[in-house]
Image: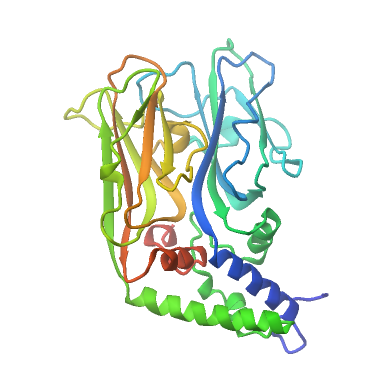
Amino acid sequence: MQTALTANGSIHPRLCEETVRLLDKLRRSALIPFVMESNVNNATISVFSRLNVDDLKNESGGPFVCSRVRIFTTAALAAAASASVFNNISVKIVDNDRHQVLTKEPSLLPVLVSRRDNTWTLDRPHVIASEGSWDVAVQEEGVDGTTDIYVAFLGETVLGDMTAAEVRRAVGLGIYPGFRGRYVGWSMASFVAEALDGPCETEKGEMLRLALRLRVAQLSLKLSEAHVRPIVLEASADNLANGSLTDLPSAPLRNDSGQPLAITRAMACTVAARAAAAATSVFNNVSFEIVRSDEKKLTWRPVLAPCLFDIRNNTWLFERPMVVEPGGSVEARVFEEAVGATTDVHFSLHGLMVEGLSTSELQECISLGLFTTWERRRR
């Protein structure tokens, strides 16, 4: 195929067929938030230390679509508000999946991540395959080697029958639902609209195109008639036991609405004691382990709070809404890494209750980019 267009300007049938095939696979996939994190304690001065690759191996069950890298540095963990990264740490990141270097040379943190939120936000998602991994090396440039460095990869996993190559192809074609800050329904893209108008190259492709076109029309109509309202679920635990996991109560985080929920973000608040004082960034000594009631993990292992939550607003904004079925829940466990057992933790899930669609229909709408949210569209 030499061009994407035919002589009359329409999409080439072969490209149309590939677009329809990938859209149908996306429709049948679940896109679940996922985070991997590892760390080095007391980094050796002027020597590169490698993070444990087993911590950064994609064992989510599907291709991992990374959109952000969040890094936190500290001289010691303490029950204190998290702050910006140190200015004397360099990081080198390699995608082991395809031996691709993400940082050509070791990059000093202040020119790699934003000092507002310690985050490198990718302009285009980077995909690694199931069982793929990251190779991360860190170095302290000056001062004594007492710095602890935490590195997290945030994004989502594609659970279904799509391979990493197919996800990359969907990204390349512009049909993978946009991620944070670029969350626009693909139904507004003329390219996809033309692909649904066809024709495809083969009879099998044409049948799939017609079925998908009908399904999109059905879902769009249902979505337009659905009743949607905001919902917040919150659970807490007081005086965390130091050095052990504490389960947050599961009942407050259960969807007992009778309707599917589209969860858009998680938030956390950590305090030594509740008082009439201004809230601060999440403490840097608390880790979170989060899993759905269907045993799908959102964090591969416990993740330190400032690597999971934006320290400006204590928020973990999902790349797209996560569906929680009626009766389903999110299980959260918290771990105080250091200091006395006096920390109180509050954890909340924000989202939308959607009445008029089934759980599977809502997931289809999200996976196809039909279900958008105002927060992402206004960024």
Residue 218 x/y as whole percent? 44, 80
The residue sitting at the right extreme is 2
Question: Can residue 217 be seen in this snapshot?
Answer: yes
Tell me which corner region of the image, top left, top right, bottom left or bottom right, holds residue 43.
Answer: top right
In the image shown, does 370 or 245 lie closer to the viewer?
245
Image-quadrant location for residue 221: bottom left
The total number of labels drawn is 0
Q: Quadrant of the N terminus?
A: bottom right
Q: Mark yes or no: residue 121 visible.
A: no
User: Where is 114 relative to 206, above or below?
Assistant: above
Expressed as whole percent of the image width and height from the top left, the position of residue 272 reads 26, 22
Instruction: Indicate left or right for 221 with 170 as reference.
Output: left
State left or right for residue 83 relative to residue 235. right
Taking the spot 36% from the left edge, 76% from the top edge, the residue there is 224
Among all residues in the image, which is located at the extreme top?
Answer: 144
Where does the image place residue 15, in percent across and percent down from the top left? 72, 75
What percent of the width, then of the height, locates residue 65? 59, 50
- The quadrant holding residue 211 is bottom right
Depth check: give the residue in front, 314 or 58. Answer: 58
**Residue at the farthest bottom position:** 8
Q: In the rendered view, how is the structure colored?
A: rainbow
Q: Does residue 369 lie above or below 9 as drawn?
A: above
Residue drawn at (60%, 24%) of the image: 89
Which residue corresponds to the image point at 59% horizontal and 84% vertical from the top-left?
210
Q: Quadrant of the C terminus?
A: bottom left
Q: Is residue 324 above or below residue 189?
A: above
Residue at coordinates 53% horizontally, 47% vertically from top-left?
A: 155
